[in-house]
Image (cartoon, rainbow, N blue to C red):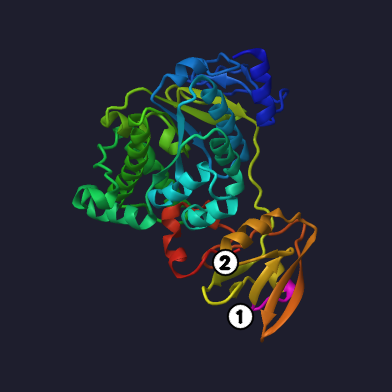
Amino acid sequence: MPRLATLAMLLVLGLDAQASCTSTATGAGLAPGDWITPGAWITPGDARAHTSPPMGWPMLARQQVILLGEQHDRPDHHRFQLASLAALHAHQPNLAIGLEMLPRESQPALDAWVAGDIDEAALLEQSQWYRYWGFAPELYLPVLRFARDQALPLKALNVTPELRQRLVEDGVSTLPPAQRHGIPEPVPAMPSYRERLEASLEEHALELGGQGFDDDMIDGFVYAQQVWDMAMAQGLAELVEDGHLAVGLVGMGHASHGEGIEAQLKSLGIADVASLLPLSADDACEAEAGLADAVFVVREDKQSEGPRLGVGVESSEDRPGLVVTEVVPNSPAEAAGLRVGDRILSFAGRGIAHPYQLKALVPRVLPGTQASITVTRDHQRQTLTVSFPIMEPALDVERGEGTRQHQRPALQQEQQQEQEPQE
């Protein structure tokens, strides 16, 4: 990559060029004393650092599919994805972006967004972002804007939690192709993939104080991951069939070791696949050979929780505003005097008609400041002042406001059937 382009990537990613780590890894990782700085590219298991992917952007642009991994709540990972997309697009303009975040039902909204027919608020509403994905859209909007600005197709790779449950419980092949979006039966998991998934499941069981899982539960968990991998692989394969370089934005586990999406792609005849992962300097130092085709070293930059109002709300078609269905104890909402049954009409001077609008506005309030909230109560309109503390504790209540953005969509299904998500 030319020096100017390398500098541009570093600026886009907001990297600290002087940050570094000394590896303590041995064996397949880097030898002690090797230095890896944020902004470097490495091949896992190889001590040499590069200013661009070791195989080069032109070669990557000739692949059929590129998997860009992410930890969903990490802004630095999403900056890595945006910069990688820009570099790939410079070498291959016929590029399309696949999104794990949304199910096939969201495709019309993505098409309308790329065409410029709807704005960001309508995109979030029509795609049902907050129903299907528990992570802040602000993390993804730069990529979505890039796609629209460059007229790049966006493809929803996922399936709804309801369909995923049916596919897992009944088996993919039991449903007619039209009901499963043509998703084929996944190929069996590699033994190494099964071992990793089983180890992950056992780790979660220990965290929850459980005694582990029996073979049937492990089989079900592994099959669920295979179905998820195949659903995304099939969506990416459709982009390849349409003549695009398909770039998938997916969770790290789906893109690692060639065991997840890549294995399912190969069963579909898609062999030219590369995976690029973002890792911190410490993790990059210890990355084992085969983890990915290349690793980009990011500066640690975890997503903060941001302000939380502390209410559950639902909308109705016949009246404006949102009805408060729950007020979280010790929350800013409770301190401001909000009550169950209040109807929220506006927040911070902006009219509120849908839950997604409140969900989008609250995180924009700076901690340590206040915002007005207008409600009707007993047929009387009044304006309350909500104060957001500088150090706001995470809220962990029934159906988990403080934890819901870290849940996978499959775990959110039950809480989203009854009412809109909390804010």
Amino acid tagged 2? Val
Considering the image in quadrants, where does the C terminus appear?
bottom right
Residue 339 part of the magenta-drawn span: yes
Relative to 232, say whether 271 is above or below: above
Q: Which residues are magenta?
A: 335-342
Judged by its main secondary structure, the magenta piece is loop
User: Which mark lies nearer to you, 1 or 2?
Assistant: 1
The span from disc 1 to disc 2 (Cα, nearest Å) is 19 Å
Q: Is residue 157 left or right of residue 79?
A: left
Residue 263 image label: none
Residue 134 part of the magenta-drawn span: no
Q: Is residue 406 visible?
A: yes
Q: Is residue 260 visible?
A: no
Q: Residue at x 74, y 63 (%)?
A: 348
Work out whether residue 322 or residue 15 is closer to the camera in this orientation and state it: 322
Residue at mark 2? 397
Q: Is residue 232 left or right of residue 279?
A: left
Residue at mark 1? 341
Give the structural element (helix, strand or loop) at label 2: loop
Residue 354 lies in what quarter of the image?
bottom right
